[in-house]
Image: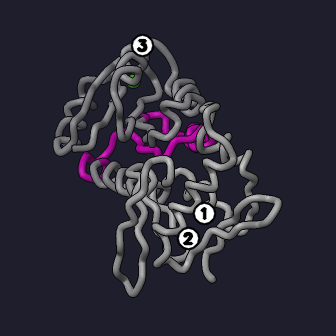
Amino acid sequence: MKSLLVIEDSSEVRVLLEFALEEFAVTYCSHLKDAKEKLSKNKFDLILLDLGLPDGDGLQFLTHLAAQQETKEIPVIILSGKSEISNKVLAFSVGAEDFISKPFDPLELRARVSAKLKKSDRLQSKSELFRVGDLSFQVPKQKVHIVSDGKEESVELTSLEFRLLLTLAKAPERIFSRDFLLGEVWGSDVSVTDRTVDTHIGHLRKKIAKSQCKIDTVIGSGYRFLPSH
Ligand code: CA
């Protein structure tokens, strides 16, 4: 179930919201101070934000949310009686996803919230999926499939092999030195040597042998990923 944070101090509006948002898990608060605390402890999929609040201004809070790493990806819908054009322009310019004027129709509000949630789901799954040549990467799950004729064949990789392949595949044809790959994939592990890179590239080549993609040796320089050969 999607989780929403509503920051609204009017109890009348809240009754309408409870009806409109009954299909979601909603946390309500009427002060920005509470909202900050809730945001530091929980993950939310969307925020509904009133502009006039007892302890501050919603637009300023929106600016604050947009500047924080933890909250900048959460879509925010402004809910306000101050529907002058200048307010709307300001809200959109500091990152609001939508602006709903009070009084509102609960069913329209529900539809707009659902639309925003669907949009952010789509954006998220796009950034999690990465495709190059016939290889399809599911980044959070560290999985790779070879896709041919619409069929997917899973490639069994260790976490390290996955990171190595992803690093190469994200920049096709770019030449990566062994040193760079050591720093990027192995990080601060000092027990590894150039030979370690060669060994792992050897394993990767075997594992993706059925793919059209290949890892090419550039003598004297390093390795590069070629999407087809
Ligand atoms: Ca208010």
**Quarter of the figure that contains the C terminus:** bottom right
**Quarter of the figure that contains the N terminus:** top left
Kindly tell me whether mark 1's CB lies below 8 Å from ligand 1. no
- In this image, 127 relative to 93: left or right? left
Q: Nearer the viewer, residue 153 or 33?
A: 153
Nearer the camera: disc 1 or disc 3:
1
- Amino acid type of the residue tagged 3 in the rendering: Lys
200 above or below 182? below
Residue for point 25% across, 46% down: 106
- Provide the secondary structure element on which disc 2 rests: strand
Residue 157 seen by the camera: yes
Q: Are marks 1 and 3 in contact (CB under 8 Å)?
A: no
Tell me the magenta residue range: 80-109
Residue 136 is tagged as: none
- In this image, 26 relative to 130: left or right? left
Q: Which residue is mark 1?
A: 169
- The 10 Å Cα crowd at callout 2, few under 14, some 14 to 19, many 20 or more, is some
Alpha carbon distance from label 1 to label 3: 45 Å
Residue for point 41% across, 30% down: 50
Q: Quadrant of residue 34?
A: top left
Residue for point 41% across, 42% down: 101
Tell me if residue 96 is in the magenta stretch: yes
- Provide the secondary structure element on which disc 3 rests: helix
- Provide the secondary structure element on which disc 1 rests: helix
The image shows residue 172 at horizontal and vertical percentages of: 67, 67
Kindly tell me whether mark 3's CB lies below 8 Å from ligand 1. no
Q: Which residue is mark 3?
A: 33
153 above or below 17? below
- Amino acid type of the residue tagged 1 in the rendering: Ala
Q: Quadrant of residue 45?
A: top left
Sequence-wise, the earlier of marks 3 and 2 is 3
Alpha carbon distance from label 2 to label 1: 7 Å
